[in-house]
Amino acid sequence: MSQLPGFSISDRIGMVRDRIQSAASQSGRDPQAVRLVAATKGVSIERLREAIGVGLNLAGENRLQEALPKIEALQNTPVRWHFIGRLQRRKVRAVVGVFDVIHSVDSLDLAQEIDKRAGFAGIRQDILLEVNLGEEPSKGGFYADHLERVLPQMGGLAHVRVKGLMMIPPLATVPGHSRPYFRRLRELAHSLSRQSIGDVSMGELSMGMSDDFVVAIEEGATLVRLGRAIFGERDA
């Protein structure tokens, strides 16, 4: 449904919500357990206002320099912000406390830097740990076995709360081909939750984008990150 010429943002959000509800219900899940994060890279403030006007309340940005003007312009709206792109350590200070959740924490060093900056700010920052289940060298993220080893250190960070896992599966031409990766992420989260480490939770699974979010929901996604399905094709 990423190509829907002639449909308004309101129409598209309505169709997405219907598909989320259907996928969750057919999987025996509560549809309220799945939240829509609109991926807003390349989307104008005006179009974001339109989406917020029909109930959008979570926005995800990949680029800090693009996010900050939007956050400023929309500060009096009910939308909350998640950071969903690759995060460089030198930009952590500008991200901490501005975004409710950072989805893309892909190393212990990055988590420690977030912890340090959150400590300076006197807050606790919610994060998700990005997992590279396809073990693709071109992508960031923990390999599963490495994550299992470093998770106890994550639990020792005083100013970070690990809320779950995030992933981007290997590129697939058929949505169903991503299913094994979504399932493995759910199983990994379940396994890690047994460690009962500090303030580490595995309740959130951020997985699924415009082409495969239905499959992701069937496999346990709690956060789906959709851009084209809502806003159509963008230049950025």
Image (cartoon, rainbow, N blue to C red):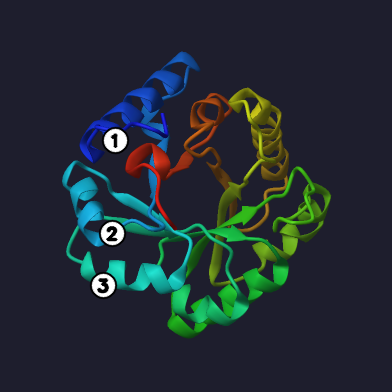
Q: Callout 2: 10 Å neighbours few (<14), some, many (20+)?
A: few
Say what amino acid the circle numbered 3 marks: Glu
Q: Is 95 located above or below residue 215 in the figure?
A: below
Q: What residue sits right under mark 1 in the picture?
A: 13
Say what amino acid the circle numbered 2 marks: Ser
Q: What residue sits right under mark 3 in the picture?
A: 72
Element at badge 1? Answer: helix
Q: Is 18 located above or below residue 229 in the figure?
A: above
- Distance from disc 2 to disc 1, alpha carbons, whole Å, reads 16 Å
Residue 97 in view: no
Q: Callout 3: 10 Å neighbours few (<14), some, many (20+)?
A: few
Query: Who's the residue at 32% across and 57% down the image?
Result: 80
Element at badge 3? Answer: helix
Q: What residue sits right under mark 2 in the picture?
A: 44
Q: Is 51 located above or below residue 180 in the figure?
A: below
Residue 133, quarter of the rendered image: top right
